[in-house]
Image (cartoon, rainbow, N blue to C red):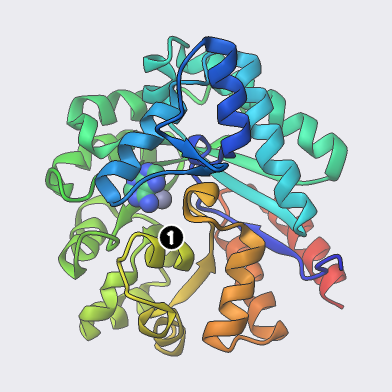
Amino acid sequence: MKDVLPKAEIHCHIEGAAPPDLVAKQAARYGVDVSAMIENGRFVWSDFTSFLAGYDRAADLFRSEEDYALLAETYLSSLARDGAIYAEFFTSPDHARRAGLSPEAYTNGLAEGMERARAKTGIESRMIVTGVRHFGVEAVEAAARFAARRTHRLVSGFGMAGDERIGDLEDFERAFEIAREAGLGITVHAGEFGGPDSVRAALDHLRPARIGHGVRAIEDAELVRRIAAEGVVLETCPVSNVALKVFDDYASHPLPALMKAGCKVTLNSDDPPWFWTSLKREYDVAREHFGLDHKALAKLTRTAIEAAFVDRRTRADLLAKAEAKMR
Ligand code: ADE
Ligand code: ZN
């Protein structure tokens, strides 16, 4: 049955959204052996470190503008089939450069895929340029400078992903200032593998409107009150968190507690095929394991649209579209 609840996500890594069959096709095209990386149609990894390494290897198989157009079109079309009307995804010019493509060509390729998906399904989308934390401060500042040039109108945000266990967040202040001055929306991964201190450091030094994950803020009640009071939006990814063992199971996941404390939360798929998830599955998990009913799930969709890095007109149109489908 078609799932009618309108959905939106604002936290997905485009390289991490490539399904195994597409990665295998790309590998065949470029003559790369991926048998150690894909077994029985599933990605193979064992922990955060090996996941990040596998992610880098998969990303290296997207090398041309058309490869990225196909990737964005595949991801967004599948989201639209699940009832999504809006998606914001993370791009990584560093991964593109490592695969031999300029950040401009990479962004244009993705934008072409976004336009194709929109023409086919109506899904609206935007790109958030990210720096990769474990590639270092210089690389993240270069990504911010590229984002600030706003080479494509569909680039509307800046963020940072990568290994939270490496480096200090305050060292990235300048990168985030560059992006903020260019008028980009700001988000940053924190409180996934880092504890509540990482979330506090992000708020103090980088002043994001949204935090990627942020779920480990739950370990500090004062911080949870601050997140609620300041209206910072948490881009939560429950299935990713359980797959990566940030929490042992859904019963220990803090999403319901964060909602109860008044924090704004959204549901997101992060790197869907790596964690055997999809945006639809995130909503299903929230229904089955967190006891959220249709009304509560609809509110999460609304929060994602309200927190989206889009202009006022687009936000109003998306909210109206969501409301019409919720009736
Ligand atoms: N890059 C891709 N997925 C990520 C995650 N879950 N955390 C940090 N960096 C990432
Ligand atoms: Zn993420």
Q: Is residue 142 above or below residue 226?
A: above
Q: Is residue 130 above or below residue 82?
A: above
Q: Is mark 1 within 8 Å of ligand 1?
A: yes
Q: Is residue 26 above or below residue 255?
A: above
* Identity of the residue drawn at 40% across and 32% down: 36
* Identity of the residue drawn at 61% across and 57% down: 278
Q: Quadrant of residue 178?
A: top left
* Identity of the residue drawn at 40% across and 82% down: 258
> Which residue is more in the foreground, 307 or 66?
66
**Number of marks drawn:** 1
Horizontal side of residue 317 vs 33, given as left or right? right
Tell me where residue 200 appears, x and y as whole percent.
20, 65
**Quarter occupied by the N terminus:** bottom right
Tell me where residue 191 appears, x and y as whole percent.
27, 63
Tag 1 residue: 240
Report helix, strand or loop for mark 1.
helix
> Which residue is more in the foreground, 40 or 30?
40
Horizontal side of residue 239 vs 227, given as left or right? right
Tell me where residue 3 appears, x and y as whole percent.
80, 68
Tell me where residue 51 appears, x and y as whole percent.
34, 44
